[in-house]
Amino acid sequence: MISGEPGIGKTWLAEAFAERRAAEGWLVAWGRCHETSGAPALWPWQQVVRDLAGRVPPSPAQAAALRVLLGDATQEDDPEDDLATGAGRPAEASEARFRLHQATANYLQTVAADRPLLVVIDDLQWADTASLGLLSDLALLLRGAIAVVITVRSGDGPAAVHDTLGLLGRHDALRLPLAGLDPAAVAELSGLRDAASVAALAERTRGNPLFIRETLRLAEDQGIDRALTGVPEGLADVLRRRLLDLPARHRPAIDAAAVLGTGADRWLLAEVVAHASDTADGNVDVDEALDAATALRVLGEDLRFTHDLVRETVYADIPPRRRAGLHLAALRALELRPGADLALLARHAMAAGPAAVADAVRWASATAGQAAGRHAYEDAAQWWRRAVEAHGTLPGADPREHVELLLRLVRAQLAAGHGFEARQTRAEAVLAADRSGDPLLAARALTSLDAPGLWKFYTYGDVELHTVRRIEDALAALPEGDSELRCRLLGCLGMERYDGSADPRCDTATAEALAMARRLVASGEAGPELLAITLNARYLGVQLPEHMVELDAIGEELTRLGLPGFELLGHMIRERTRMDLFDVAGADRAAGRAGVLVERLDLPWPRFQHLIWTGTRRLLDGDFDGAGNAYAAAAEAGERLNLWHTSATLSSALLARHFTMRDFEGADELMTHYSPFPAHQQVMRLLIADSRGDRTTAETAREQGWHALPRDFGELPGLCLLGEAQIAVGDREACAVTYRRLLPYEDRIAFGAGTFCAGPVGYYLGRMAHLGGAAGPEAARAHLDTAAKRCAAAGLTWWAARIAAEREAVRG
């Protein structure tokens, strides 16, 4: 990785490196990222692959995927191959993207088999999300004699660029930050012999080669003394001073060139200037203007600006109304060219303002579809959002069309793994459907969140009553009998009502939906996707200890449906349910399969959730440092999600670590993001206070009574902690009640879906029987003996030792 300030010479260094490698017998391929040129998705990789494919043809197994990467998929490709058509099912979106990335890596390795390969990606700060995703996967997939050189402008680019650089750094990438040239190098570059002038030039330009060259060009006309003393110190100001040497009659053509970017040619420029002539000052001789700009070295012989910063400076100085007019002129000219890139048309349409709103909707939608076809789902979501926003400003637009755009945005967000954003978009779609007057359209919007989900896509503990009512109204409006829409609505209803209250309607609605899905699939009226969606709804609607065996069976069934996204979900469910059922080996097998798919599908939420599970698994082994490291990795992954849920989950997991270690130092700060339920807050605060010898909190609990625990996936660890708190307070009567509630689950591990693991339930039953007076020493010894044997048989040696020590403390 080569990084530096704008114009420091990153490209020159990469080119020099490439020339040296080529001289050593390397095969060199270049790719440039240029957001400002309106480049299509995966632009740098398209350049690299097109270049290499002309020299080293891909194998038939690689060809279909590379045609998608190049944007060349045709009807000749297998219509059943979603890599060729881009029409993969939403649940398989990430699987298709992984296959594309894997095929690209395989092709590069094929190229490198006979001759070492050097790939140079220039100006990564302008890369699109799909390019960054491919680069990140290649860091894991590439093998053999392949070197990748990346240049990036320091401090520029969105957060995704810096996330990618961080990931590459963790794979031992060499990073070369570039500084400015020293005075000796400035003297060599400039040719100046006067030491004072060299020192002044070095100080003013901070050794920036581009700044040095531009200042010297200014000096050719104004003299070195004036160039060094009479010009502001900013590079853009130096560029503007040089641009003043262009006659005013030439500026319209140069402005048009800046609007068109790197894709301009003389004929296109002439068309754009002619289209925008009503806002220009008279007729413009484009050839004369271009020759003048080339003579001043504003443009090169290829009509590209001599540096992107020159173009950016020209573009920024165009008045807004004139800029919009030039974009509209560029759009109209490019629409007549059959090879025009869709993304370029969309960018010009959006920048053209109100005069091209309908065009913006059209071309943004087309670009979104193209991005999805290349499995660039993040980029597809961005373009669908732009299409939605443009459509929202279109006078007289059809509300039904607006809903359809929003539903496509939901689909892209789900495919990209952004479930919470998709939920917000769904709410927009439901409101827009109301304006359409079509109840079926509203029902489709309500059921659009059908991606695999281990957790719900909204703040846990809340129920959106307005959403529940909308679903119930939609169900009432549908005819009786089986239908896919009715099945989806019932599943949604059960999920939406899950809030920790064990609402029986969660059970009845999801059970009815699942039975209906099985009938529809058996009759051929629906495919396995409906069954997968409904199984997921059932899982999310009835996460309670008494349903654990059924939940485990749901996970098993999901792994066998042949849908990669739901297969991952099934394994992630089973790594939790198997552990809860005290099948540690089974949980580890499921986790191993889940880990492979997490890396393969590369979805942000599953990665975060699997890291949480990994930390909790290590906690069960008494590996507190390992658990802390896994939670730290989860925290890093959670930061990229930027959602409340990650903080709450991490706080719960870290508090479980404190609790298991019996060390609450530093736990107080975690309470802010801990559970929203008063019962959880009360118990944890009491345990923290008791560890410090503070009896005030215990006395308050005895006076005020105990809050009711929520009935949810965390019920078993909640009961274990409640029993510990009641022992600390000395409330034997309450402890006996908790003991009886927990007794049916003696053969379980209180795993809390991996977010809060308390450990073997038998251990806590033994403590409550003895220390809490719930059943007496004999029962306590029986519980502890059984729990110790289970732990030893399962390989949980740390817990076996801990329980054995507890057993020794129980006296007859």
Image (cartoon, rainbow, N blue to C red):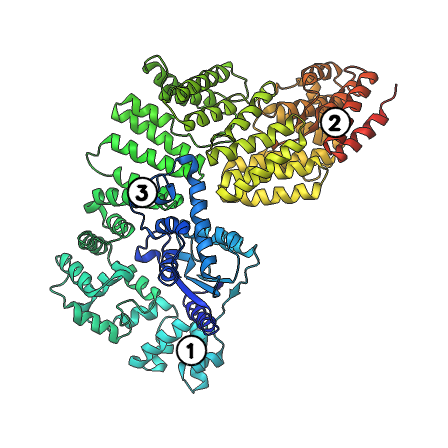
Which residue type does callout 1 highlight? Answer: Leu
Tag count? 3
Residue occupying image coordinates x 25% and y 33%: 401
Where residue 369 is drawn, which disc sits there? 3
| Point 66% across, 17% down: residue | 705
Establish if 14 lies above or below 471: below
Distance of label 3 from label 1 (alpha carbons): 50 Å
Q: Amino acid at mark 3?
A: Gly
Point out the tag, 3 or 2, that comes first from the N-terminus.
3
Q: Which residue is mark 1?
A: 201
- Disc nearer the start of the sequence (3/1): 1
Residue 790: assigned label? 2
Q: Secondary structure at mark 3?
A: helix
Q: Quadrant of residue 481?
A: top left
Residue lying farthest right? 812
Q: Amino acid at mark 2?
A: Arg
Q: Position of residue 395 (x, y in %)?
A: 20, 36
